[in-house]
Image (spheres, coloured by chain):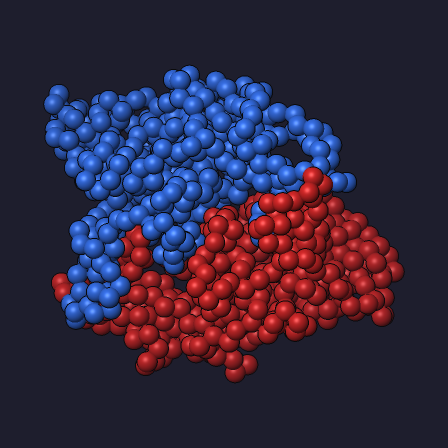
Chain colours: A red, B blue
């Protein structure tokens, strides 16, 4: 990878290279505001509008979306999934075959690994998420493990590589989007080959006609527009595993892989908003604050709420885990709103002992953030 | 309205006012980059991913969305629409009544009046759209005019005010979202009370269970979550008509109303993208460029395409106007791609004589922009 600066791009030769189109990864300068390329990404990849935290299941079009390249144009009728590599019986199946297999529906919270990136200081320059890169949908499909067993994994299988139909270039590397799971993770019974979302065939932007669902993991693992599964006997060193989705201190740190979702709670903003600032306006009186909490490591066991920007915390009540172990969970807390200015937030803890930080540890890619949200509220005099 | 600066907001009194939550309208400074409030709006209001220009009808979840306040939680079973004011027979109807009336489906291109705002210099500070605030859906409902005739318009009726269930504050003014149409525009046969989009009940974010569709007009006229229609004998002076959606030179200019959509063509970006820059990469060879063009004033009669950033233009071929007179129209042009760097764009002209400008005239709200898009392309050596 080569650093591409603006002067070089302007003076490009007649036959440009991939590097001319593809800037290197970088971190914004101390005073550098959101730039045109980040804004362009924000305009196409959208988050959940926070009031949609009211829905147990996120309706179509409100679930977050992060699409690395373009949404590909895939013909569902002609689409096939190939299982190849270190297997005894390579196989190719179509959608009708997959729909004829065991049918399972799971409610799963998906969150982008880069959620919260734009709040980091310094800011890694990429999709500039604040807190809204999340959704909770019902995914229907067939479990992956039986298909892998049918193909017959080689005893020395190490990684399973999932390849989508989306093609692009990223930091100078031309690629189909490709992510590997260690064999043990690929064989988890919860992992699905999903062809429906919320009871309807997948929408183009969610991976139509087929995607992977890896409950508990950040979004980068849930490969969309899935077309091949390749079993490998050596660790996969593709871009999205070896370069992109790693927790690094700096550019020279090999880092560690981004895997499961860190615990997070969000407040559903109360009252009504100002159009521009999104500051919330309430009138005095009893108010029930609520929101959602989730973790990909272990069940959420507690949520605490602050109304003073983190100075003090009070326990929230947790609803039953009605959506299953991979679905977000509703929390609520009564709050007598009296005139003044407030900063609301919530923090989740899970059964693995992980708790959301108020000060966010930093990493160079801006991944796996779960800093506490800040919701500015004014309660009027009347 | 009061200007609220940061120092004042920090030193707010114990009982804040609406002005503390609601900054005044302003224009960014000459060097001012996109700020946190603009980014927050970009994260919740999303545009069409430009590759989705491939679809004649924009699928659910890919259509642009601009929501002033929050998506309200409306119970479709209990929802009613009241027709009141200067009418002989005020009436209230429910969804079942509306569904029992004449059923019409129209394919209509909707565009946000603020599309292109973030490309203006200086930049009006609001939702920072680039070029992607558009969609083309099939809206099903019943025509408005028969309902108004049934209620019996007073002979001195001037404006018809449409009120949604969404509530918020904007530039210091607390309001339900409310927009008026002149009576003659409200009585156009094409105006619909729509309860379906693309053959399914409206999604929450598109105005469920009922919205107005005003073919040819910018999005602000298509009131979502519609609950009352009030006929007035004096011109409506509500915020969204009298203050917000006006073409003004400066803050003191009373301006003129924003109404119909100016002509615009977009290029569907060819090849494949770089993740970060969205620069397009192609290999040399024959390529067909295509895209969409529309105008709310009159049919599109020509589209011209540039591959050199506007220095030279070539005519594109226009497909039939298959979707009806209010639907965008596909254009295409063969382009032999040879190695080098290019800036693609397209400009539409309509039968009213309007043509897209290469240099954008400026207005203080950043409305009705239709400057030519710039799509950066590199064609590699091989």
The quadrant of the image that shows the N terminus of chain A is bottom right
Q: Residue at x 26, y 36 (%)?
A: B249
Question: Is residue A92 left or right of B199 when viewed as pictured?
Answer: right
Which residue is found at the position 73% from the left and 35% from the top? B284
Q: Is residue A339 visible?
A: no
Residue at point 36% right, 45% down? B123
Estimate the x, y position of residue A282 in percent, counting from the top left.
23, 62
The extreme bottom residue here reads A353
| Vertical side of B299 occupied by B284: above or below | below
Counting from the top left corner in percent of width and height, residue A98 is at: 71, 50
In the displayed structure image, the side of residue B152 where residue A225 appears, left or right = right
Task: Answer with left or right where residue A14 lies relative to residue B138.
Answer: right
* Closer to the camera in the image, A80 or A371: A371
Residue A69 coordinates in the image, percent (x, y): 62, 48
Residue ID at (59%, 50%): A7
Picture mark count: 0
Quick check: A162 above or below B137?
Answer: below
Q: Does residue B352 appear to the left or right of A240 in the view shown?
A: left
**Image quadrant assignment for residue B380:** top right
Q: Quadrant of the C terminus of chain A?
A: bottom left
């Amino acid at each position: 990878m080569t650093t591409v600066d603006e002067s070089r791009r302007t003076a490009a030769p007649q036959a440009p290279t991939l590097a001319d189109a593809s800037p290197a990864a970088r971190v914004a300068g101390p005073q550098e505001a959101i730039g045109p390329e980040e804004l362009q990404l924000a305009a196409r990849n959208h988050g959940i509008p926070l009031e949609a935290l009211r829905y147990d299941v996120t309706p179509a079009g409100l679930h977050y979306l992060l699409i690395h390249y373009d949404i590909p144009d895939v013909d569902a009728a002609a689409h096939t999934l190939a299982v190849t590599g270190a297997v005894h019986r390579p196989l190719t199946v179509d959608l009708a075959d997959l729909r004829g297999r065991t049918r399972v529906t799971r409610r799963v919270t998906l969150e982008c690994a880069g959620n919260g990136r734009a709040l980091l200081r310094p800011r890694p320059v990429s999709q500039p998420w604040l807190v809204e890169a999340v959704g909770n949908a019902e995914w229907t499909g067939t479990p992956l493990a039986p298909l892998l067993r049918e193909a017959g994994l080689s005893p020395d299988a190490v990684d399973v590589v999932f390849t989508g139909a989306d093609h692009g270039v990223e930091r100078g590397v031309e690629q189909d989007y490709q992510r590997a799971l260690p064999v043990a993770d690929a064989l988890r019974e919860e992992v699905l080959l999903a062809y429906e979302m919320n009871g309807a065939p997948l929408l183009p932007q969610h991976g139509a006609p087929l995607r992977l669902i890896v409950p508990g993991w950040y979004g980068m693992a849930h490969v969309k527009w899935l077309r091949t599964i390749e079993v490998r006997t050596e660790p996969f060193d593709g871009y999205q595993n070896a370069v992109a989705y790693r927790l690094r201190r700096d550019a020279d740190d090999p880092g560690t892989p981004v895997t499961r979702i860190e615990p997070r709670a969000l407040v559903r903003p109360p009252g009504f908003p100002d159009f521009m600032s999104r500051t919330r306006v309430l009138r005095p009186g009893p108010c029930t604050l609520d929101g959602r909490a989730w973790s990909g490591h272990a069940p959420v066991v507690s949520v605490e709420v602050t109304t003073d920007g983190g100075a003090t915390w009070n326990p929230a009540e947790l609803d039953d885990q009605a959506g299953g172990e991979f679905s977000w969970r509703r929390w609520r807390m009564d709050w007598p709103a009296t005139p003044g200015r407030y900063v609301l937030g919530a923090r989740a803890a899970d059964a693995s002992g992980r708790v959301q930080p108020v000060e966010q540890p930093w990493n160079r890619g801006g991944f796996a953030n779960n800093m506490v949200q800040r919701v500015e509220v004014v309660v009027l005099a009347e």
